[in-house]
C-alpha cells in the first residue's frame, strides 16, 4: 500500500505547488482586493468537494459495471447541468452569508460588497461545474490509461480543481470587480 500511495501523493504534492504559482500570477489583484483572500478556502474546497463526489460515484458505477468506458459522454452530459445547479445553490448560500455578515456588522466587506458577493457566487458556479465535470471524467481517463481510478482519482481531482479553481475565481473577480476594487 505504501508504494501505491507514496507515488501518487508525491505527484499530487508537486502538482499542488501550481496553486502557489496561480496565486502568484494574481498577486497584484490580491494586493488590491485583500477581501478576495477570505474566500479562497471556500472556493477551493467547494470545487474539490464536488469533484470528489463525482469521482466517488463514478468509481462505484464503474466497479459495479453500471457504466462502461464508452459511457463517458452520457456522464458528461449529465454532470454539466448537475454542476451548474450545485454551483448555483452554493453561490446563493455564499451571497446570503456575505449579505448577513455585512448587514449585521459581523464583517465589513467594503462599499462594493455586492460585487464581492456576485464574484463569489459566479465563481462557485464555474468552479463546482468544472469540479463535477473533472471528477466525473478523470476515472474514465485513468481507467483508459490502465491505472486503477480508486488509487488516485479523488486526490488528483482535488489538486487539479484547486489550481484551476483559483484561476477561475480570480478571472471572475477581474470581470466583476474591474473599475471598482481592481
Image (spheres, grey):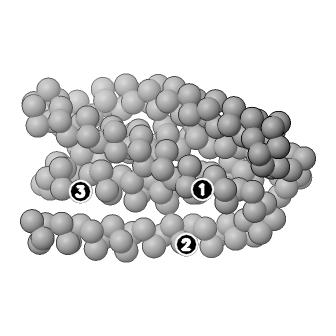
- Is residue 17 among the parts visible in the rendering? yes
Q: Earlier in the sequence, mark 3 or mark 1?
A: 1
State if disc 1 and disc 3 touch (CB < 8 Å).
no
Quarter of the view holding residue 95? top right
Element class at badge 2: helix
Element class at badge 1: helix
Identify residue for label 1: 40
Q: Is residue 168 or residue 111 the one in the foreground?
A: 111
| Mark 2 to mark 1 CA distance (whole Å) | 14 Å
**Numbered badge on residue 27:** none
Identify residue for label 3: 152
State if disc 2 and disc 3 touch (CB < 8 Å).
no
Residue at x 33% of width, y 67% of height: 12
Residue at x 56% of width, y 34% of height: 90
Residue 75 picture location, percent across and down: 31, 29
- Quarter the C terminus occupies: bottom right
- Is residue 115 among the parts visible in the rendering? no
Q: Is residue 92 left or right of residue 114?
A: left
- Badge 3: how crowded within 10 Å, few (<14), some, or many (20+)? many
* Image depth: mark 3 or mark 1 in front: 1
| Mark 3 to mark 2 CA distance (whole Å) | 23 Å
Q: Is residue 119 or residue 96 the one in the foreground?
A: 96
Residue 127 picture location, percent across and down: 53, 44
Q: Earlier in the sequence, mark 3 or mark 2?
A: 2
| Mark 3 to mark 1 CA distance (whole Å) | 24 Å
Residue at x 47% of width, y 57% of height: 162
Residue at x 86% of width, y 50% of height: 110
State if disc 1 and disc 2 touch (CB < 8 Å).
no
Element class at badge 3: helix
Q: Is residue 74 left or right of residue 30?
A: left
Amino acid at each position: 500500500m505504501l508504494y501505491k500511495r507514496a507515488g501518487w501523493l508525491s505527484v499530487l504534492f508537486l502538482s499542488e505547488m501550481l496553486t502557489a504559482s496561480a496565486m502568484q500570477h494574481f498577486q497584484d489583484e490580491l494586493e488590491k482586493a485583500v477581501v478576495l483572500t477570505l474566500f479562497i478556502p471556500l472556493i477551493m474546497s467547494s470545487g474539490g468537494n464536488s469533484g470528489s463526489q463525482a469521482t466517488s460515484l463514478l468509481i462505484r458505477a464503474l466497479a459495479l459495471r453500471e457504466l462502461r468506458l464508452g459511457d463517458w459522454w452520457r456522464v458528461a452530459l449529465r454532470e454539466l447541468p448537475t454542476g451548474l445547479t450545485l454551483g448555483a445553490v452554493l453561490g446563493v448560500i455564499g451571497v446570503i452569508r456575505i449579505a448577513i455578515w455585512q448587514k449585521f456588522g459581523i464583517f465589513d466587506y467594503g462599499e462594493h460588497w455586492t460585487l464581492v458577493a456576485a464574484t463569489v457566487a459566479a465563481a462557485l458556479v464555474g468552479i463546482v461545474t468544472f469540479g463535477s465535470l473533472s471528477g466525473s471524467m478523470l476515472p474514465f481517463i485513468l481507467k483508459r490509461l490502465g491505472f486503477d481510478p480508486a488509487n488516485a482519482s479523488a486526490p488528483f481531482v482535488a489538486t487539479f480543481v484547486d489550481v484551476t479553481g483559483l484561476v477561475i475565481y480570480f478571472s471572475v473577480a477581474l470581470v466583476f470587480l474591474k473599475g471598482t476594487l481592481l
